Image: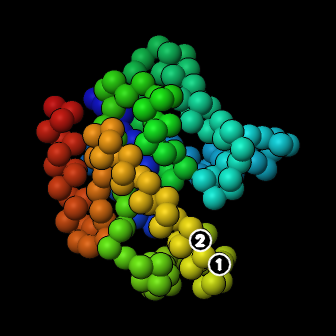
Amino acid sequence: MKNIMIFGICRTGKTTFSRMIQENFENYQIIEVDTIISALQRTVQNVQIGFIHDNVKENKLPQFLSLLIEKNVVKNGKYMNFVINGDSIMPHDLIKYFNLENTIVYYFVNSKLTPEEILENCRKYDDSTEWTNRRTDEQILNHMKFYKDIEKQIIEECDKYKINCIDTSENRQKIFEKLIQDIRKEIQ
């Protein structure tokens, strides 16, 4: 089995796809980077770990996450399979800090959608548990505009480092079904 990492821009289907992987393949634990960041920020004063939009100077998230994964695999004495997803690990940090042996990596973007279209989709599809329901339209638009610049950087870095960059702007379900087939071939 292989571990799977899904990073990229918010609202691209990372969590939805993680759940699909868990439903289609046995023994995959989902690790949500956003949950880890939120827990650390709420419990550890002046922690140098944050979301991309937090602009944390010398963000230690990549190092922390890499060590967490490494120690859990070794500690348990057996190979644990995981799907990790989040929007705060850039491709250059992935290459620098993570052992990608036996790992499938995807970065999701939605480069064909404008911030306004993403907002419209949030209001149409997001349920009450999503963070977008606790934000105003203006806050979400500003957030998405900020991430459009990050998205360009992700696309460039994925190209540079030969990492799978998947645009989920259109036909998301079909894309996810194809990726499930690709994963099935790769882990057999």
Tell me the residue at 63%/45% (across/down).
36
x then y, percent, for residue 6: 40, 48
x then y, percent, for residue 12: 40, 64
Figure quadrant of the C terminus:
top left
Report the front residue among 118 and 176: 118
Whole-angstrom CA distance, mark 1 to mark 2, is 6 Å
Tell me the residue at 57%/25% (across/down).
67
Helix, strand or loop for disc 2: helix
Tell me the residue at 59%/71% (across/down).
143
Residue 13 showing in the rendered view: no
State the scheme by which the image is colored.
rainbow
Left or right of 125 on screen, residue 60: right
Q: Examine the rendered structure and indicate whether residue 113 appears above or below residue 152.
A: below
Left or right of 188 on screen, residue 126: right
Report the front residue among 68 and 106: 106
x then y, percent, for residue 109: 37, 61
Q: Examine the rendered structure and indicate whether residue 2 appears above or below residue 134.
A: above
x then y, percent, for residue 135: 66, 78
Badge 1 vs badge 2, beta-carbon distance below 8 Å? yes
Q: Which mark is residue 169?
A: none
> Amino acid under label 1?
Gln
Q: Which mark is residue 143?
A: 2
Left or right of 172 on screen, residue 182: left
Q: Examine the rendered structure and indicate whether residue 74 appears above or below residue 83.
A: above
Q: Examine the rendered structure and indicate whether residue 88 appears above or below residue 176.
A: above
Figure quadrant of the N terminus:
top left
Left or right of 168 on screen, residue 129: right
- Residue picked out by circle 1: 139
> Amino acid under label 2?
His
Tell me the residue at 55%/50% (across/down).
88
Report the front residue among 64 and 177: 64
